[in-house]
Image (spheres, rainbow, N blue to C red):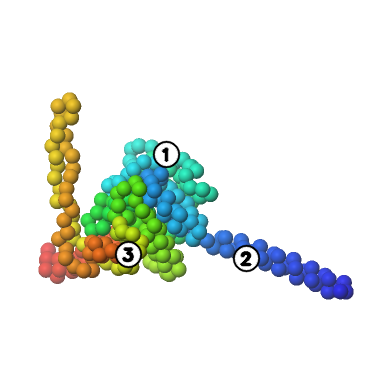
Amino acid sequence: MDLLSFVQCGIFSTFAVRSTINMAKAKKKAQPVILITNDDGITAPGIRNLVAAVKDLGKIVVVAPDKPQSGMGHAITIGHPLRLHSVDTFQDIEAYQCTGTPVDCVKLAVDKVLHRKPDICLSGINHGANHSINVIYSGTMSAAVEAAIESIPSIGFSLLDYSIDADFTAARRYARLLVEKMLKNSFDKHTILNVNFPAVDDKLIKGIKICRQAYAKYEEDFIERNDPHGRKYFWLTGEFVNFDKGRDTDVWALKNNYVSVVPVQFDLTNYVLKAKLEKNWKF
């Protein structure tokens, strides 16, 4: 090989190495940032399973409550300090526990941890149902809603099993599938999906149903008791009742072993009623 050929070969080799390095950097830089939170607390099995399901789909950052915050809805902390601590809960994944609510976690994650909006926010996997009216009370779904308010597409995941030993095998598989769909497709920045998994063996799940929210609620009862000091207190109980017999609802889908996916929104305007009022109410 003559000198020119040797130099050209060397230049080409250097160029190829640099190109490879640059491509690797670009690929790493292009990774989507995925924020993960929940309402059951950062040590809950559900969030561990969600992280495991999607950990190779992007750069994962976890910001979750330091204790259970179920039923908190869209509560935020006012008048009390919030504390945020780095934790080594998930191997090789940046994670923080927060003393606040699920919504606080999303707000702090965007403003103080990421210093930017993530590409997607995932909340869950919740221990227990968040179908029908439960979406109103759910801390899991409120975290997802808060993300969407901040122009971050989001998904809330829930498994219809409250047990600490719940089997998340099917939930992991379908959660990953849905996250891949959202990452690969262009969605409105305010997109929110409420996803519920039936508590059955993976082999029994028939697939995914896009649904509407059922009209179902708890027929509540407050049991009256006395504490050891004779002071009266009340304990909330109730029975879940489905008033909606439609076959296109989340309750129907889950009862029939489908994963339910309900697109929800934070705009609570009743546009049908708005149009009627504009037409019929004259002031």
Q: Label 2 crowding class (10 Å Cα cut-off): few <14, some 14-19, many 20+? A: few
Q: Residue 96: x and y, percent?
A: 46, 44
Question: Which dot marks residue 23?
Answer: 2
Q: Residue 162: x and y, percent?
A: 30, 49
Q: Residue 272: x and y, percent?
A: 19, 68
Question: Which dot marks residue 205?
Answer: 3
User: In this rendering, does residue 148 appear at all?
Assistant: no
Q: Earlier in the sequence, mark 3 or mark 2?
A: 2
Residue depicted at 41% across the width and 44% down the height: 43
Residue depicted at 23% across the width and 68% down the height: 248
Give the camera-side residue of 5 and 278: 5
Of the residues shown, which amino acid type is indicated by label 1? Arg
**To which residue does mark 1 refer?**
83
Alpha carbon of mark 3 to alpha carbon of mark 1: how far? 41 Å
Residue depicted at 35% across the width and 48% down the height: 165
Give the camera-side residue of 182 and 178: 178
Residue depicted at 83% across the width and 74% down the height: 5
Q: Residue 57: x and y, percent?
A: 49, 61
Question: From the viewer's perspective, is 21 left or right of 10?
Answer: left
Residue placed farthest to the right in the image? Answer: 2
Q: Earlier in the sequence, mark 2 or mark 1?
A: 2
Report which quarter residue 19 is drawn in. bottom right
User: In this rendering, does residue 167 appear at all?
Assistant: yes
Do the residues under discs 2 and 1 have CB atoms within 8 angstroms? no
User: Measured along the vertical axis of the image, is residue 115 above or below residue 9?
Assistant: above
